[in-house]
Amino acid sequence: MAGETETDVKTWGDILNPMSMSTRHQLGLVGLLVLFVFPLFAPPINTLHLTGALFFATFVMSWDVVSGYTGEISFGHGLFFGVGGYSAGMLNLHLGVNPWLAAPLGAVAAAIAGLLIGFPSLRLKGPYFSLVTLVTPIIVISVFRFFPDLTGGELGLVSVGTVDKFPGIGPIPSPGFSPISGFYLALGVFLLAMVVFLAVTRSDAGIVFTAIREDDVAVAATGKNPAKFKLFAFLLSGLIGGLAGATYGFSVVGSFTVSELLALVVSIEVIVAAILGGMSTITGAAIGGLFFYLLRIQLRNLEVTIPVLNAPIGEFYFLIFAVITLGFLFYLPEGIVPRLVHESRARFGTSDGEPVADGGKAPVERIVERWVDDLRDLIGRGREGKP
């Protein structure tokens, strides 16, 4: 155990160099101070944009702790966001549960969903597991459409009236109803998630998560149970992801609708944002989530006219945004944060250490390679007619 601790400290120490510990703490405190005073000086619209970005970044971190660390790629992570949000929203709307209680209960519901999704990962890997996570939110959306009186169907909970069983009970005012309170609600959830995820991933559990990503058979050979750690990762991810979805729905920037909580595009955006920031880092996922969300907002609101097309950029923001995102993914496959760390090392003359066995590949590259290998095995068995 002592050897593992020393290795872990050395690894993260190398990542954080060349700054001293005191310098990093000072930068962190400055960043927190800027966030805390931001609503006092920024226009309300910018406060709303950053509020949405904080909720989204929290959700991206919840994806990273599962897929970035254990290597189990989830294509339907929006399930946790949606289950947490809808559970809290229905408790508030139909039963009159206060949002401060409904949000944690929604997070618990999402944690249970995390366990249910985590169980298949004990037997399924690669494309098999990813397919399960992709289909699950689609099934949930279909179920919601069968009970429009409870879920609001396509329009979401905003379209649901009070049910006859509980006359006179309606939605209670949200804790994040105003732009200022909504911002600090988002900031609180964001900081809570970051502290929890950093504490877990920097502990012995985080070392095991990373080892499972590389080779879960080798982890089992050491006497540790990969299944237990995978379930814990899904439980934690579902809990925080569900809390983000619930508080987002109650905030001034969110709503309890399928398009915002359960749509497939939400799950895809989470993956892209995590890769942009840097998978298997938590801080990279957080920065990637903030960058992704704010860049999309800025492009959508640009009023600059494109000369040839004689139309504002805002009308083509999604296409431009997709091109920019692809460019980042192509030139920065390791992510923004790892690249900044690498450039900082080069600038300050810090040694990168000895060559590693994996050739220095980024986590996302190793995960994708293993996923593709599993897919090829699947196709190969299918061609040979094997079960």
Image (cartoon, rainbow, N blue to C red):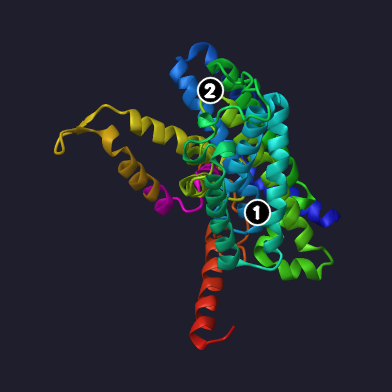
Q: Is residue 124 magenta?
A: no
2 or 1: tag closer to the N-terminus: 1
Q: Amino acid at mark 1?
A: Tyr
The residue to which callout 2 is attached is 252
Extreme residue in the front direction = 164
Q: Position of residue 158 (x, y in %)?
A: 52, 29
Image quadrant for the N terminus? bottom right
Residue 211 visible in this rendered orientation of the protein: yes
Q: Quadrant of residue 174?
A: top right
Residue 242: x and y, percent? 65, 40
Closer mark to the observer between disc 2 and disc 1: 2
The answer to whether residue 190 is seen in the rendering is: no
Relative to 298, does residue 210 appear above or below in the rendering? below
Q: CB of mark 2 within 8 Å of CB of mark 1?
A: no
Q: Work out which residue is located at the far top of the displayed protein and give it.
A: 40
Residue bearing the label numbered 1: 69
Determine whether the residue tagged by mark 1 lies in a helix, strand or loop: helix
Check disc 2: other Cα within 10 Å, few if <14, some if 14-19, many if 20+: many
How far across and how far down the image is residue 304, in percent? 24, 28
